[in-house]
Each structure stands twice: as C-alpha cells, then as structure tokens.
Image (tube, rainbow, N blue to C red):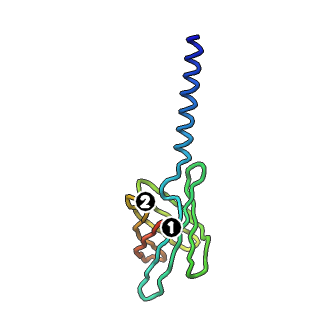
Amino acid sequence: MKKSRVSSFMLCVGLALMLVRSLAIAADPPIVGDWEGTLNPGAQPKKRIVVHISAAQDGSLNGTIDYPDQDTSGILITAITYRESTLHFESNPNLSVYDGAMNKDNSEITGTWKQGGSGLRLILRRTP
C-alpha cells in the first residue's frame, strides 16, 4: 500500500511539473501584439507605422510592419529580439532598424527608428 501511495504521489508531482512548464512556455512575452506610432520627419509629411509582433510555439518572435498612409502592409521584420523591456528589430526589405524600451505597464515603447542612416524618435503604443 505504501509503495502505491508513493507512486501515485510521484505521478501527480510529475504531471503538475509538466503542466507548470507548459503554461510557462505558452505565456507570450509582453511585446506580443500590435503597436502603432507616428514618425515626424520634419519637412516631410508624418508617417503612421503599425508593427505586428507575434510569438511562435518555440518562443521565437516574428512580425510585420504596415504603413497605413502609404497603403503598404505586411513588410517582413527580418530580425527581432526582446529582452528585459528592450526591443530591437530590423527589416531588410525597407532598410529600417528600431531600438526601444518598454514602459513599466507594457503599454508604450519609446525608441529610435532608423531608415537610410537618419534616426527619428518613435513612440509605439499598444493598440487594442
């Protein structure tokens, strides 16, 4: 009887650990979602940017960029990292790079958008 109890207990502990691990893997990082901001290049017209970031099952991030004012969407983000509230992504098709930091409530990223060598401040806000 004692051996059966120990086996049942070990089985329950093993199942609980597997459940906790799968929940931890399934939780998306706070960067996942849709983000919108507006570039202000000064003499040129302002340009809205929408960034879509998603996570694959293995935890890797991917995304696309839309430019609603130019009727352009789905530009591939070719490299993306998010660590300790710091976001970096690159898009080779349009030669752009963004580096920013997320605020404490995960609602806004403040950073610099570089395209063609010049850098502009860009604040991305989470969209519903």
Identify the disc placed on residue 106: 2
Residue placed under numbered mark 1 in the picture: 127
Q: Amino acid at mark 1?
A: Thr
Q: Amino acid at mark 2?
A: Asn
Which one is in front, 101 or 107?
A: 107
The answer to the question of whether label 2 and label 1 lie on touching residues, with beta carbons closer than 8 A, is no
Counting residues from the start of the chain, the first of labels 2 and 1 encountered is 2
Position of the N terminus by quadrant: top right
Q: At 37% across and 58% down in the image, what residue appears?
A: 104
Name, please, the residue furthest toward the top.
Answer: 1
In terms of image quadrants, where is residue 11?
Answer: top right
Q: Is residue 28 above or below residue 96?
A: above
Q: Where's residue 18, x and y in %?
A: 57, 35
Which one is in front, 108 or 5?
A: 5
In terms of image quadrants, where is residue 118?
Answer: bottom left
Which one is in front, 89 or 20?
A: 20
* Label 1 secondary element: loop
Q: Is residue 114 above or below residue 21?
A: below
